Amino acid sequence: MSLLFEIPEEKPTKFCRTCEHRERTQCGGSIIQYCGVRKSNLTDNGKLKIKAKRPACSLYIEIEK
């Protein structure tokens, strides 16, 4: 099968791990990470659960070092 043109795959360069909105909460022996800006109706605190390796959204702000 041949394609008419090739679609370049772009790998994300920004992740939730380096976002200023990331909030970490310890629950028992594990750490749960939430986005401080994005909302969710599925969690008790109303914040969206995230994973550190997830590509960043449009609300991304890099952590100042």
Image (cartoon, grey):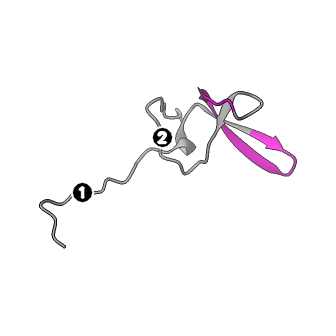
- In the picture provided, is 15 more to the left or to the right than 6? right
Residue depicted at 56% across the width and 32% down the height? 20
The residue pinned by badge 1 equals: 8
> What predominant SS class does the magenta segment belong to?
strand
- Percent across and percent down for residue 37 are 59, 26
Q: State which quarter of the image contains the N terminus.
A: bottom left
**Residue 57 magenta:** no
Residue extent of the magenta highlight: 25-41
* For residue 28, above or below residue 60: below
Circle 1: residue type: Pro
**Mark 1 residue element:** loop
Residue depicted at 48% across the width and 30% down the height? 61
Residue toward you, 20 or 56: 56
In the rendered image, the residue lying farthest to the bottom is: 1
- In the picture provided, is 28 more to the left or to the right than 62? right
The residue pinned by badge 2 equals: 56
